[in-house]
Amino acid sequence: MMIPSIRTISVEIVKNLSGVFFDIDDTFTTSGKIHSVAYQALWRLKDSGFRLLPITGRPAGWCDHIARMWPVDGIVGENGAFYFWFDEKKRKLKKRFLDPEDVRVKKRQRLARIRDEILPSVPGSALASDQLYREADLAIDYCEDVKPLDSRAVNRICQIFKKYGATCKVSSIHVNGWFGNYDKLGMTKIFIQEHWGLDPDANKERFFFCGDSLNDEPMFQYFPHTAGTKNVLRFVNRM
């Protein structure tokens, strides 16, 4: 369960940790910006030997950059559609998708039909500005670059996704929808097993997760040591 405050975490728990998983928007960022103290903290953790893995709903295009240039071991993107990591020895970005390219193309065509229903049906909604860089999901902006929509509008977006049989998750800025049963946790466990050669179930107490919204719920449920940033209070009654 989430600890009451990061300041209350015990020394024994911290000594046993080997890695930190973290959401990006409104968890690692503050009002959309990465402050110097946050980015410096990543380097301090990395230099101390911690494994670091961002777990985000952000698109493949962003994840390409992050995997290459941030002090992280890899990144899980688009709510679990893939993980990317940068092979330092070969100086090459490696990509691991759940679905092959031909399947992703067909799913994007199906998502386009959902897009064409949501935008005229929910006034004020818009495609997320990063939609062009996505491989596997549809992101509808409800408060990042548009005037914040109320809960009824957000629920209406979710209803349309679900009508088409799509999975739907609400982040702190977008409503994301995709075809498939994957989530952030599923791909995180695949990364732990494939990239680090560890059994996730046997090692989950060695990792700490930080998140803030509904699409982080599987991570909060699975990992024994987690913390939500303050804005998680917006969503806690729906978790």
Image (cartoon, rainbow, N blue to C red):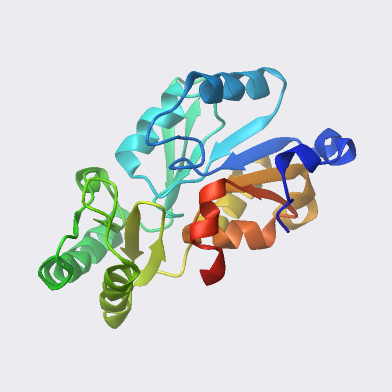
Image point (34%, 42%), residue name: 60
In the picture, measured across the screen, residue 208 lies left or right of residue 35, that is right
Q: Can you say whether 231 is above or below 73 in the image?
A: below
Residue 163's quadrant in the figure?
Answer: bottom left
Instruction: Report the label total.
Output: 0
- Identify whether 163 is placed above or below 12: below
Of 120 and 49, which appears nearest the observer?
Answer: 120
Instruction: Report the residue that reaches farthest toward the right.
Output: 12
Q: Position of residue 220 (x, y in %)?
A: 63, 58
Classify the position of the C terminus by image quarter.
Answer: bottom right
Quadrant for the N terminus in the image: bottom right
Q: Which residue is more in the foreground, 237 or 99? A: 237
Question: Looking at the image, which residue is at 44% across and 27% down?
Answer: 34
Q: Residue at x 10, y 69 (%)?
A: 120
Residue 206 percent coordinates (x, y): 77, 43
- Image quarter of residue 224: bottom right
The answer to whether residue 63 is left or right of residue 209 is: left
Q: Is residue 239 visible?
A: no
> Relative to 34, does residue 210 appear above or below in the rendering?
below
Q: Is residue 30 left or right of residue 153?
A: right
Where is residue 59 drawn, in percent x and y? 33, 45
Residue at 68%, 50% in the rendered image: 226
Q: Nearer the viewer, residue 169 or 65?
A: 169
Considering depth in this image, is 154 or 188 the residue closer to the camera? Answer: 154
Q: Residue furthest bottom?
A: 163
Where residue 205 sits in the image (x, y, percent)? 78, 49
Q: Is residue 19 visible?
A: yes
